[in-house]
Image: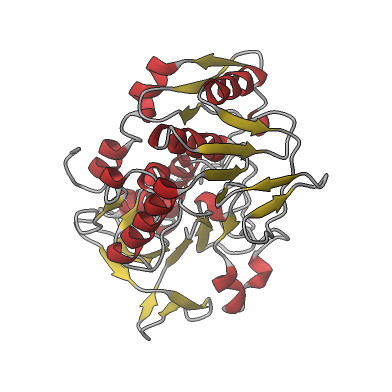
Amino acid sequence: MSDGDVVVIGGGYAGVRLAKRLDATARVTLVDRKEIFFHRIASLRAGVRPEWTVTPFIPYDRLLRHGRVVADKAVRIDTGERQVTLATGERLPYDVLVIATGADYPEPARFIGTTTEEAAKAFAGHQRSIATAEHVLVVGGGPSGVELSAEIRLARPDARITLAHSGPTLLHSTGSSRAARKAQAWLEAHDVEVRLDSFMSPGHDFGTYRDARGNVIEADLSFWATGTTPNTLWLRLAGHGDWLNASGHVKVDRTLRVEGRLDVFAVGDVNDATELKITPAALAQADLAAWNIRTYLNSSGRHRKEPRLYRPVHRTPLIVPFGPADGLTMLPVPGGETAVLGGRTSVLAKAKTLMTPYMRRQLGYTAT
């Protein structure tokens, strides 16, 4: 074991991966406000289907063999003393600090509260609302909006469902026109009304929604799948607003260090690496940061290793499930093109299980 103390703030995909990578070579403390890991990839289905309510929750207790997980909230970082102060008053010394607090997602892909019971109650509330709604409006035609629309349609074949998207095509941020056509064709074949070039205002009045052109949609339930917000307000309140860019992301260099600091890293959705904010990218960042942290902690040795530089991922495989038995997979190929694969590949890779067995194994549990 190294003598280095590593404090990781945030127990999402990147934080869990990095903490596990360093567990055998440093004294790792993982801090998260939640008492349990939240497998967000499974959250959209959990918000629709009662049998999936508890699926996204995986305990942290088998993640680390040597380190520890603390259910608390970081409120202050003293870079001079190299200490993190928690809401309970506990102070954690560090040789390396990692910011991995991720991003806040719209409901139902959000962990409400701090306990499993609170989050499960929120999921159950969404399920009841969906089960009784006559017209559901989903705003946002990116991967999450398309996936959620499909989940709701399969759970409620009798309800009216409208997907309103501000862009000219669905999934337009992926740059794949074929994927856009396939997603729209599936939704429309399942009687989901797709409205393109329809920018919706977040404000609504008793179930009446208006787009930028004044068109009105009346719906008794709505979900907004229109992007994420980095969880960095706590850093600003702690006096480290200079670490953030205009959008609230942590500014990092190519080694994934916070700009100007050798002993503070930021990984995953929380940083400003220019790429799609998806799980594979967060895991890749965690792996590279783990290497660079080990290099930093052992830098006084004779055989000093050089830090690795991160190359932002601009083209990566992306799977959009249409429920558990269908979906599409976008696979980058040489020449800048994107191959679009159909249901079988998507079901095997993600749609059926939503990668739950994989994440359970990552946290030390059996796949089931």
Relative image position of residue 287 (x, y in whole percent)? 42, 43
Q: Which residue is drawn at 69% across and 58% down?
A: 247
- In the rendering, at what x and y percent does residue 191 appear? 54, 27
Residue drawn at the location 58% of the way across and 19% of the way down: 185
The structure's colour scheme is secondary structure
- Percent coordinates x, y for residue 221 in the rendering: 53, 51
342 vs 359, left or right, is: right
Above or below 33: residue 291: above
In front of the other: 11 or 170? 170
Position of residue 75 measured from the top left corner of the image (x, y, whole percent): 48, 78
Task: Give whichever of 124, 216 is nearer the camera.
Answer: 216
Residue at 30 percent across and 42 percent down: it is: 359
Give whichever of 13, 26 is nearer the camera: 13
Q: Is residue 200 visible to the viewer in this orientation of the structure?
A: yes
Image quadrant where one finds the N terminus: bottom left
**174 left or right of 211 in image:** left
- Is residue 304 at all visible to an observer of this figure? no
Extreme right residue here? 213
Q: In which quarter of the image is residue 174?
A: top right
Q: Which residue is most to the bottom? A: 89
Position of residue 75 in the picture relative to residue 139 (left or right): left
When the figure is inspected, residue 246 is found, relative to residue 53, above or below; the finding is below
Identify the residue shown where x is 38% and y is 58%.
Answer: 125
Image quarter in which the C terminus is found:
top left
